[in-house]
Image (tube, rainbow, N blue to C red):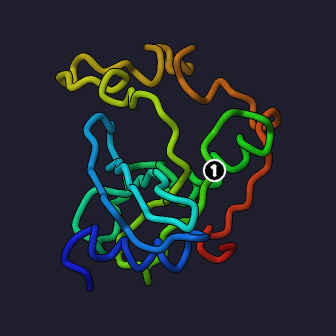
């Protein structure tokens, strides 16, 4: 097992990204709310290319802890693919990490210039300041994601993304 993200990532990129010749740099960015985000630069046949990687926090090879109902990064990658296919401007997903990759849960995608807003959207505040999930009467709050109709969302596969790669 690789000791660092960079050591594990280089061979994965060379195997899985068309035209990748080598990893030039891998920089962990700040600003992610609950996942690690990396800016990756690779050498390709056509010159340098930027990519991004989202992965669960921890050492390479760690299994991501389960956080309530969060479906995981493989499902997040599938949702991004579904949104992109429906015309939403989303990055192209190039590879969903597998256990054999030794980097834990995550995916590699197209780099899009912009700002990560996670830290702004999920501020570090005491638990007493959290938005309640339901009203005192027990009804769903208007801010609750449950207000969205499942019928209005696209169907996605529920099998592991690694099985489709």
Count of number-bearing discs = 1
Quarter of the image for the N terminus: give it: bottom left
Residue 154 appears at what percent x and percent y?
Answer: 79, 43
Please, what secondary structure does the residue beneath circle 1 have?
loop
Give the quarter of the image for residue 87: top right
Quarter of the image for the C terminus: give it: bottom right
Give the quarter of the image for residue 164: bottom right
The correct choice, above or below, for 145 with respect to 105 in the image is above
Residue 60 appears at what percent x and percent y?
Answer: 27, 71
Give the residue at x 82% y 36%.
Answer: 151
Give the residue at x 28% y 43%.
Answer: 29
CA neighbours of label 1 inside 10 A, class few (<14), some (14 to 19), many (20+): some
Q: Which residue is mark 1?
A: 92
Residue 150 appears at what percent x and percent y?
Answer: 75, 37
Residue 141 in the figure: left or right of residue 78: left
The correct choice, above or below, for 143 with respect to 35 in the image is above
Residue 77 in the figure: left or right of residue 66: right
The correct choice, above or below, for 98 with respect to 87 in the image is below
Residue 116 in the figure: left or right of residue 97: left
Report the front residue among 55 and 2: 2
Residue 140 appears at what percent x and percent y?
Answer: 56, 21
Give the residue at x 44% y 61%.
Answer: 106
């Amino acid at each position: 097992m690789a000791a660092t993200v960079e050591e594990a990532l280089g061979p994965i990129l060379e195997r899985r990204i068309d035209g990748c010749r080598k990893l030039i740099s891998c920089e962990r960015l700040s600003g992610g709310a609950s996942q690690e985000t990396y800016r990756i630069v690779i050498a390709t046949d056509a010159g340098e290319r930027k990519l991004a990687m989202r992965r669960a926090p921890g050492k390479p090879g760690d299994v991501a802890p389960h956080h309530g109902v969060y479906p995981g990064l493989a499902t997040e990658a599938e949702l991004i693919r579904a949104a992109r296919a429906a015309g939403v401007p989303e990055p192209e997903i190039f590879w969903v990490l597998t256990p054999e990759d030794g980097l834990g849960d995550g995916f590699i995608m197209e780099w899009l210039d912009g700002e990560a807003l996670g830290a702004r959207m999920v501020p570090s505040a005491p638990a007493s300041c959290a938005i309640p999930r339901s009203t005192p009467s027990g009804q769903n709050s208007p801010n609750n994601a449950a207000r969205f109709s499942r019928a209005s969302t696209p169907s996605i596969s529920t099998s592991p993304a690694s099985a489709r790669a």
